[in-house]
Amino acid sequence: MNLKVDNISKKFGNNGLKEIGFLLQQGDFLCITGQSGCGKTTLLNIVSGMLTPDTGDVYINEKNIYYDMKEKERTQLRNQTIGYMMQGNSLIPDLTVWQNIICPVELVGKKVNQKEVKKLVKKLGIDNVCESFPSDISGGEYRRVLLARVMMLNTEILLVDEPTSNLDENSAKIVREVLYEMHKEKGVSIIVVTHDQEFFAYHPKRLSLY
């Protein structure tokens, strides 16, 4: 699965995403860096099909996701092909951690692999909070639950926005290792927006926005 971003831009007043392009091939690991306000999250929103760019095009296997697809198709694309871990507090407050993790899988009509869920939550160090509600867990645990939720969709492309933000070093290391493992063992194409310099030790591709 190849992703091509061709000279996209998006303006919000005096700020926004300046024209940018890149090619993400199957199995690539791309880190996106840049100062606050340069459009990193905006870029992920466009790539995921959630935000139409002012200029440029986004292609999945040579199909333009904004001009060759309707909104329903883009929604299906996010559910089946592109997993997206956003920065916000998007867990459902009335569901337990476990239910939050498996809910998206069930919503897209996939079968929940209970064994795989247990393995993943243990790797991420959140197996002890699976019966807790989002309001009862720490900020670091919350971030790892968000990651587990999107990883369980087993999409071919994974977009991750600041996965180690506000985590202590031990928790950040766990998150990095889980992403590296997913990339290496499953061949998932990953785009990570991050300020975490430790990601670069893995020698992924790097794109800096200004």
Image (spheres, rainbow, N blue to C red):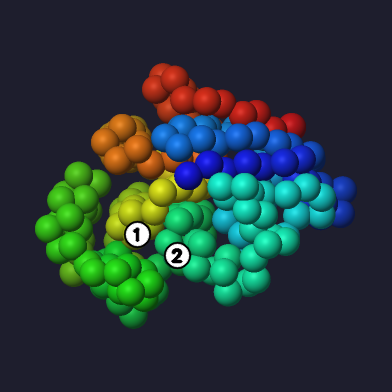
Mark 1 surroundings within 10 Å by alpha-carbon count, few (fewer than 14), some (14 through 19), many (20 or more): many
The front one of 48 and 67 is: 67
* Image location of residue 176, percent across then percent down: 35, 35
In the depicted structure, whether residue 34 falls above or below residue 55? above
Q: Secondary structure at mark 2?
A: helix
* Image location of residue 46, percent across then percent down: 65, 54
* Image location of residue 189, percent across then percent down: 44, 40
The tag on residue 128 is: none
* Image location of residue 122, percent across then percent down: 16, 49
In the depicted structure, whether residue 206 falls above or below residue 174? above
Residue highlighted by disc 1:
153
Name the residue at the front extreme.
Answer: 62
Residue shown at the point (45%, 37%) measured from the top left: 26
Name the residue at the bottom extreme.
Answer: 94
In the depicted structure, whether residue 197 falls above or below residue 168? above
Residue highlighted by disc 2:
79
Image-based side of 8 in relation to 127, left or right: right
Residue shown at the point (70%, 36%) measured from the top left: 21
Q: Amino acid at mark 1?
A: Leu
Measure the C-alpha gap from mark 2 to mark 1.
Answer: 8 Å
Mark 2 surroundings within 10 Å by alpha-carbon count, few (fewer than 14), some (14 through 19), many (20 or more): many
Residue shown at the point (48%, 44%) measured from the top left: 1
Q: Is residue 108 visible?
A: yes
Residue shown at the point (67%, 54%) measured from the top left: 64
Circle 2/circle 1 CB separation < 8 Å? yes
Quarter in which the C terminus is drawn: top right
Instruction: Please tell me in which quadrant of the rendered image residue 177 appears.
Output: top left
Q: Amino acid at mark 2?
A: Asn
Q: Is residue 133 visible?
A: no
Image-based side of 147 in relation to 157, left or right: left
Image-based side of 114 in relation to 163, left or right: left
